[in-house]
Amino acid sequence: QVQLVESGGGLVQPGGSLRLSCAASGSIPSRHVMGWSRLVPGNARVLVAAITSSGVLNYPDSSMKGRVTISRDDTTHTVHLEMDNVKPEDTGVYYCNLDTRPWESSVYWGQGTRVTVSS
């Protein structure tokens, strides 16, 4: 089992920056992908950014690409999402996940952290 704990959400003004963190603990497999998703209307989760255990990056959300940076610290098993030039439409709940596919079959999710972009 893997546990994920997010932190860093809160209120930020438009144009500002925010850093989200996700600390993983438990039985973390050596090969995995960690990512950040945001909840969109309809309760779907859109992947914002991901990083593999070998450091390969992916930014599939075109609305946030160029404004977010994902990084990882393997000494603390923590993944960060730096959000810059935030916009009101970035407001929402952001979830960290650890995906063991295709090497294994489990996907783990954190409890979510709320980001509010407002002046």
Image (cartoon, rainbow, N blue to C red):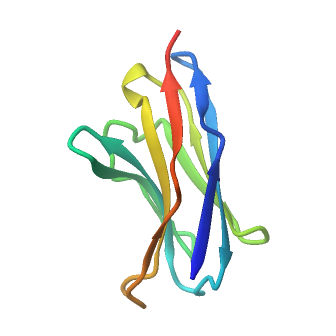
Which residue is pictured at 42% across the width and 90% down the height? 104
Identify the image quadrant of the N terminus. bottom right
Residue 11's place in the image compared with 82, above or below, is above
Answer with left or right where residue 63 lies relative to residue 55: left
Q: Residue furthest right?
A: 75
Q: Position of residue 3 (x, y in %)?
A: 61, 71
Which residue is pictured at 52% across the width and 55% down the height? 111
Q: Residue furthest left?
A: 42
Q: Residue furthest top?
A: 119
Which residue is pictured at 36% across the width and 25% down the height? 89
Answer with left or right where residue 104 lies relative to residue 8: left
Which residue is pictured at 32% across the width and 36% down the height? 63
Residue 50's place in the image compared with 29, above or below, is above
Q: Position of residue 48 (x, y in %)?
A: 40, 49
Q: Position of residue 59 (x, y in %)?
A: 40, 52
Q: Position of residue 57 (x, y in %)?
A: 48, 62
Depth check, front residue: 56 or 24? 24
- The image quarter containing residue 19 is top right
